[in-house]
Amino acid sequence: MDGVARPTGLFRLEDGRNVFVTFALVSSLFLLWGFCNGMIDVMDKHFQDELHLTLAQSAWVQFAHYLGYFLMALPAGWLATKLGYKGGIIAGLLMVAAGGFWFIPATGIAQFWAFLLGVCVIAAGLTFLETIANPYTTVLGPRESAATRINLAQSCNGIGWIFGPIAGRQFFYSINAAGEKTGAQTLWIPYAAVGVVVLVLAVVFFFAKVPDIRTRDDYQLAGDDEETARKRSIWTQPHFVMAVAAQFFYVAAQAGIFSFFINYMTSQTPVMPGSWDSWMLDAVTAVGPDGFRHITDGGAATLASLGFVFFLAGRFSGAAILKKCAAHKVLWVYAVANVALCAVVFLKLGWISVAAVFASYFFMSIMFPTIFALGIHGLGGRAKRASAYIVMAIMGGAIVPKVMGAVGDHYGMSKAFIVPLCCFLFVAWYGYSWTRLSKTDGLVGLAANKGH
């Protein structure tokens, strides 16, 4: 023993300060972008119907969303270094507000490009928040429990994701008393509300105490001072490089499954007898001309919220598991599970395949924050730069859904699940290989509640 008292507690710094309030405030950002992402995930079907788009064409929504992340990740990382955590968060919130309010004139323009622009601007603002908030939660307490905190914060993200599709159903798939769809006129409402909320949050952060915390670099070379270590290339660290690739493929798989969930539910689920009657069935199905019950667009949006309940359950249970088990091993097991589940969906086994889609939400839950924590592990002052590149890898969500949509257009949505299956294979390899890449035995005590 060195005789020095060590801080205890999940949110206590080395100097003894308790930063739980700061952590709670930062976690509210995860709730915000979970809500925005949840609305994005049920938007595709709306534009398919309103603008008569194919699956691949509607995936431009995801492209615009993740393009914002790609374009702003490096500037966000640079600004985070210059402005500190607090300044970067406020800048991100103001950009999200601008994107949210843009939806008001976009509704009047009523062109696909106008809505895509708003989606892109909001995503650019969210990039600031994710680039800063993800690594910040890892330093708000003992470093051995970094993954646990990031997963706890990501749980707030999961809560927001549950309510996003509910808002999407209410305003994207709304129907008036005459039975006419009114989503084209009301789509702006939840986005304008987001704009108001983030302006309030920006004021709160301006007056809040948000300490800028530095941590040591485990990969600092002998003879390096702190400044030299911060400038050393992060690309010499294999566990970081492969984390960028793993995050690219994970977000690609997630975005594909989330964005085409409504299409899958409305086209691939078995029909039910029209004589079946209950308030639960009436909420998600309607009797078609063939006399059978089919899941409606609005009903599928509601079921998307149920999927995010599974997602949130996975994050909470995953946080508990990560406190006891090595993070890279948990990532490997969960990724292998999703490979198997995507195979079940691909085989089109009726309700078994439908259940597999919901189960995939559960096993995706811990992947983003766990890959993030594994990727920036031990990088100290270089973590902000590394975070920018890992967030930049979210671009996978812009590219791969278009591939999945093209497969779905030609072969059906069930067969399109071969695309996320291949993505999860790479994530499984990263989890399996992490100790060799990082030259570390393993991280125990990671948080599993934050992320995409």
Image: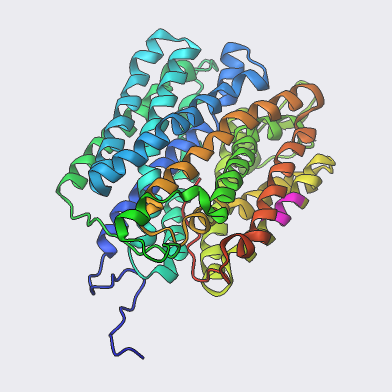
Compared with 76, 60 (above or below) is above
The residue at 48%/20% (across/down) is 183
Tell me if 71 is positioned left or right of 362 in this view. Answer: left
The one nearer the camera, 324 or 25, is 324
The one nearer the camera, 432 or 445, is 432
What coloring was used for the rendering? Answer: rainbow
Compared with 32, 125 (above or below) is above
Residue segment shown in magenta: 335-339
The residue at 28%/70% (across/down) is 13
Tell me if 261 is positioned left or right of 448 in this view. Answer: right
The one nearer the camera, 447 or 156, is 447
The one nearer the camera, 325 or 105, is 325
Residue 120 picture location, percent across and down? 43, 25
* Location of the N terminus (image quadrant): bottom left
The residue at 40%/8% (across/down) is 109
Residue 21 picture location, percent across and down? 25, 61
Compared with 400, 303 (above or below) is below
Residue 270: quadrant of the picture: top right
Compared with 8, 353 (above or below) is above
- Kindly give the residue lying farthest to the left in the view shown: 207
